[in-house]
Image (cartoon, grey):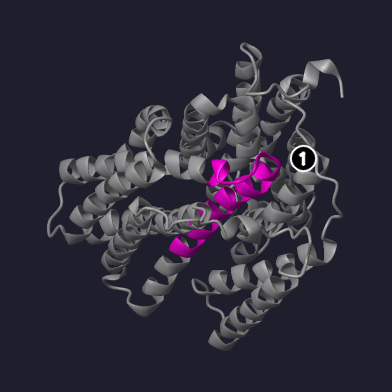
Amino acid sequence: MSAAHLVPPDGLPTPRRYWALLAIAIAVVMAVIDASLVNLALPAIAADFSEDPALAVWTVGAYQLAVTISLFPLSSLGDRIGYREIYCGGLLVFTLASLACAISPGLPFLIAARVCQGLGASGIMSVNLALVRFIYPRASLGRGIGYNTLIVALSATAGPSVSSLVLSAASWPWLFLLNIPLGIVAISIGFAVLPKTPKRSHAFDMSGALISALAFTLLMLAIDGLGRERPAWATILMALCGGLGLAWLFYHQTRQAHPIIPLDLLRRVAVRLAAATAVLSYIVQGLMFTALPFFLHVQTGFSALETGLAMTPWPMAIAIVSPFSGRLSDHLSAGVLGTVGLALLTVGVSCIALSADPSVTSVMWQMALCGVGFALFQVPNSKAIVIGAPLERSGAASAIQSAARLIGQTVGAALVSMVFGLSHSLAAGQALYLAMIFALMACSVSAMRLRPAPPGRER
């Protein structure tokens, strides 16, 4: 290990820290934004390849599926070979796969390239927070996670806007070509400034990786089937097989010395409560951002412009509040900040769900309240997951945080599809009621962290 890359005792010195943050920011923007960047281009992609639009949708689903099934295996591999190596390797795969997407001769090739792109994105997201932990001193780790949260939040909401801007001036392959110069820059900076991290000498659990991939694939397909015209028996069968796969995975992992699913971390009360709170909160986010366009535009009668304006304050509030939330998290516990934030989120969601005749102005301040609450919760909760793990298990903790976000958002969107399938006329409003219930559940779980730990029990 060269002296230039030796890990400092407590974070990187400046200005190297800022260069490392830039490398992470570019990679995270690319990985997160590409999850939704292609949505607006689906009709053009289907038309260009003369394919069924239902098959074109898999250019989105293949990416999300690849990310979900590989998060934990790649984080475990990061513990073994180093987080910088997984991060930069993921960046390289992502960049090359973007080129393959842009020059795809047909839809099957494009879907396969999107799978590769998702695997690269998973390499980035699986160890993202682990690297932040090594970049920032412990005393200001919350600040670093706050900046990271800001980048993720802006990227997640910017996808449609960036896509529409690109498609207004160029064809859909440019959505992928733009990743290539960004990827080259991020890889160059990353290899130069990201810290090398300690490695664990253990065998990689290949059988566990394969079982988890099978189980999560079946469950994702079952969730996807809730919103599609697929026979009910097929969805139920996939859900049952996926559930059995998870049970088999749990049995298998409890008998492994170095499992890829971090059961050892989830046995820690602080990590387990933070992960549960995150899943429930991201379900709320998935429900809200999927159901609100239908509720505001179709049910309430807002114009498309008014709907966009009404939904903007949530991500804007996250962008503004996240850095301050990061600073606060260096002084206040995740239980206090998270519970206060989720209480604000619950109030905001409840006001929207229970409003009989909302106006654009009223929805805007209620969405702003949701965004403030979400930012207050998100940063300290992510920090609680990361610092709840030993330093050498930072990759697994990072994967838990990313998996909680993906699972929550996916389940939230699937619940909206299920509600629409059961009740077409008032489905959007009923989905908002579900969001209110899940917000209250998240706040209640977070509040459990305010109780003092029993004597001799690790939190």
Residue 351 location, quadrant: bottom left
Residue 375 location, quadrant: top left
Q: Residues within 10 Å of mark 1 (few under 14, many from 20)?
A: many
Measuring from the top left, give residue 55's x and y in whole percent: 65, 64
Tell me the residue at 32%/60% (across/down). Answer: 444
Closer to the camera in the image, 30 or 258: 258
Q: Is residue 253 above or below residue 124?
A: below
Give the left or right position of residue 178, taking residue 41 as reference: right
Give the residue number, with chain letter if any, for mark 1.
86
Secondary structure mainly formed by the magenta segment: helix
Can residue 296 be seen at all in this image of the molecule? yes
Q: Is residue 127 above or below residue 144?
A: below
Give the left or right position of residue 294, taking residue 34 as reference: left
Magenta region, residue range? 385-412
Closer to the camera in the image, 260 or 233: 260
- Residue 396 among those drawn in magenta: yes
